Amino acid sequence: MGEIVVKVVEFRDRRHYQMQWRDPDTGRKKTKSTGIERTGRASDRKKAEKAAGKFEAALREGRHSEPAKVPWAEFRERYEDEVLAGLADKTDRRVQGIFNAVEQILHPERLRDVTTDRLSHYQRVLRDRGASESTIACHLSHLKAALRWAGRIGLLPKVPLIQKPRRAKSADVMKGRPVTGEEFERLLEKVEAGLLKAALRTGHPKRETKRRIGEEALNRRREQQKARVAAVAPTWRHYLRGLWLSGLRLAESLELSWDDGAKLCVDLSDKYPMLKIPAELEKGHKDRLLPLAPEFCEFLLETPEHERTGFVFNPLPFRGDGRVAADRAMKVISTIGQCAGVKVATDARTGKIKYASAHDLRRSFGERWAARIMPPDLMLLMRHESIETTLRFYVGRNAQRTAKTLWEAHKKAQSGNTSGNSAQISPDSAAEQIDVTPSCARHF
């Protein structure tokens, strides 16, 4: 690109100071408003010249394109550098995956090619490929945010209208469901079977056969696999118990440390064990010090004091050494759920069955505690950003449970007095009847 000089000019019929330069590619003179009102004051003229200087620098560095001509690749690169770079890694990866899908389906050459009509086509293709409505909504939400950003900084003259289909909402807003106590016991029983099945899925693409390696070698290989499964299974049972009792998200659980303050960390320094969460690992992007469920505290105390170092959970890989990645752990737990036959959801359109996962154990934790504590406390325990999330997913979801609570309260009131008022309990007598200190706290 040749030398570009942007000058400030005034026109009698224009309200604002204008910028003029000559396009080095076409040789044509171009004009653009500075947005600074032409008042005649020297200060406003200096503001316009400053704006022209910034615009000239952008032209010289190739950071400015005419809105109607902005290439899709340029828009994507700028959005990744200027927006996604400041967001969580998980969000960055998700949006880049969405952009990849847009390029694969719509093949946009310029940003303006992403129109309302094309986005409607994009939805249809995703649905035909079996994507769930929540996945489609996620794609559209991220695309809407990206296109609005492009409109705000002048890359897009008009932001397309994104039409989200309105469908009947299910009463069950969860993608899965809480796992029952009996189902959790089945998960623990099927750890070995799940590990072996998961290992076979990631093994050699060609299954070993008697004909290829011989019956004796095949039997020896199978015995080695079973021995390895028996060795690593206790670490996975311990991990599943931890997920069941803690309510931690899967990625959080694998980062949980006994003594590293830079990671998700257990704090045993005070009367009650607490959870330290650095902003980088928290979904709400805030440093937090939060309470732990009493039964999870008791679970942690099962670990001898001299072993409380490093990571709290170390589910061992089937092959090799090192740490299990979060995506791998997710697949292993789902495979265990499949072997245990714990079905948590079925896609009404495709018939695909979803088996118990790590997040369903978190749902179980939330379901149990929803019956014990008030919504604001549950919100804190679940580490939700808003009370609306807590109310939507865990409070009032089970009508039968709520009805049972109401009838039990009604019967207690009727037995207390005939007017229906609750029997009064003095604070002293209540203190004698109930020890409110969690059992795990008495260890500290």
Image (tube, rainbow, N blue to C red):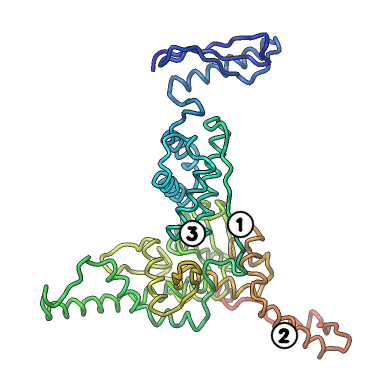
Q: Which mark is residue 166?
A: 1
Q: In which quadrant of the rendered view does residue 403 lie? A: bottom right
| Rendered residue at 39%/61% (across/down) | 327
How crowded is the residue under tag 3: few (<14 C-alpha within 10 Å), some, or many (20+)?
many
Q: Give the number of the mark in front: 1 or 2.
A: 1
Image position of 432 (left or right of 321) = right
Q: Tell me what residue is drawn at x 47 percent, y 61 percent.
A: 252
Residue highlighted by disc 2: 433
Contact between labelled residues 2 and 1, with CB atoms less than 8 Å apart: no
Give SS at disc 3.
loop
Measure how far apart labels 2 and 3 are at the Cα level: 37 Å
Q: Is residue 350 above or below residue 59?
A: below
**Mark 2 or 3, closer to the camera:** 3
| CB-based contact (under 8 Å), mark 3 and mark 1 | no
Q: Quadrant of residue 49?
A: top right
At numbered mark 1, what does the secondary structure look like: helix, strand or loop?
loop
Which residue in the protein does label 3 denote?
A: 264
Q: Residue 318 in the image: x percent, y percent?
A: 29, 70
Give the SS element for disc 2: helix
Dot placed on the residue nearer the N-terminal end, 2 or 3: 3
Question: Residue 25 bears which disc, if any?
Answer: none
Sequence order check: which comes first, mark 1 or mark 2? 1
State left or right for residue 206 relative to residue 145. Answer: left
Rounded to the nearest angstrom, the CA distance separating label 3 from label 1 is 39 Å
Mark pair 1, 2: CA separation: 53 Å
119 to 246, vertically: above or below = above
Q: Mark 1 packing: few (<14 Cα in 10 Å), some, or many (20+)?
A: few
List x then y, in percent, for residue 242. 47, 72
> What amino acid is at disc 3?
Leu
Q: In which quadrant of the rendered image does the N terminus lie? A: top left
Q: Residues within 10 Å of mark 2 (few under 14, many from 20)?
A: few
Residue 228 picture location, percent across and down: 26, 75
